[in-house]
Amino acid sequence: MVADAIRLDGKVVIITGGAGGIGSATARLMAARGARVAIADIMEDAARKVAAGLPGAIAIHLDLEDQTSIEAMIAETVAHYGQLDVLHNNAALLGPDIAQADNDVESMSTALWDRTFAVNVRGTMIGCRAALPHLRKTRGNIVNTVSNLALQGHMIQAAYSSSKAAIIQMTRAIAASHGIHGIRCNAVAPGMTMTSALRDAFPPVLRKAVEDETLRDQLGEPEDIAEAAAFLASHAARNITGQVLVADGGCASHVPGISQFRSFFSGEHA
């Protein structure tokens, strides 16, 4: 039954960036569905707070720029629980200062570009590499958080979107090379999601511009992305691998300027 297939009873899940808006929502949902969750984050105190509210959860310090830290995250989780079933690579280099500096390529700082790829791409690769031997034992899976910006061009966030596009290709590569071992690898691509970090980074006028292009009547919430990630991690998605599930409220699915068409045909132009 579908209700049983989406359960995660007995599964051990690592969620990187688990103290953030989407990460913490995903941790709560997966724990509610029976998973034992390791909350991995550079914000150690915040990770402990999230873990404290979830049965059987632990908090782990994670620095995605540090290979030793990433490998220790995998080792500590397996040592604590005895297994690993799901690695959810959700962490990324974000924040208001980063968002403001990450614009077009002509104005791009080499240091920002290199750091974005070091955290988002290199860090994700090292985590996957360290997790794969354990996932082979459990026939587990990997869920990577990317972005709808990895599938579309934009005038800002050139480094972030390029790094997420690289993770999409990494997702396909892992799915192709490790499917024979029973390991699935997928990605979820959120659009603009109403987290506290988003509210800090984007002015209301820009949020409104995206909301107008959303086919729903509002921007997505962290819980919407959590549902997509939890589905991909579950047995209900057993026949899905090497795929990108776009969870952006339909922003990437339509022709440009749909908000103007919506206004025209509703009579608002008169």
Image: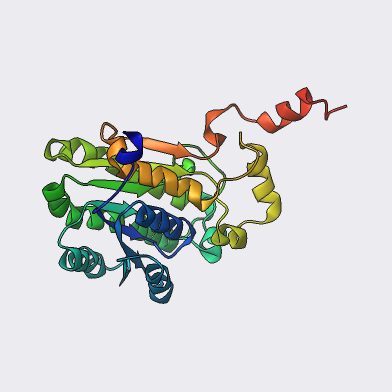
Residue 200 position, x and y percent, is 60, 63
Residue 261 position, x and y percent, is 72, 26
Asked whether residue 236 appears in the rendered view, the answer is yes
Quarter of the image with the C terminus is top right
Residue at the farthest right position = 270
Residue located 49% across and 37% down the image = 152
Height in image: 228 above or below 113? above
Quarter of the image with the N terminus is top left
Residue located 54% across and 66% down the image = 97
Q: Closest to the observer: 6 or 238?
A: 6
Residue 62 position, x and y percent, is 32, 68
Height in image: 206 above or below 77? above
Q: Quadrant of the rendered structure where residue 100 is?
A: bottom right
Q: Quadrant of the rendered structure where residue 57 is?
A: bottom left
Residue 248 position, x and y percent, is 52, 40
Residue located 50% across and 52% down the image = 222
Instruction: Give the image's coloring scheme.
Output: rainbow
- 139 horizontally vs 37: left or right: left
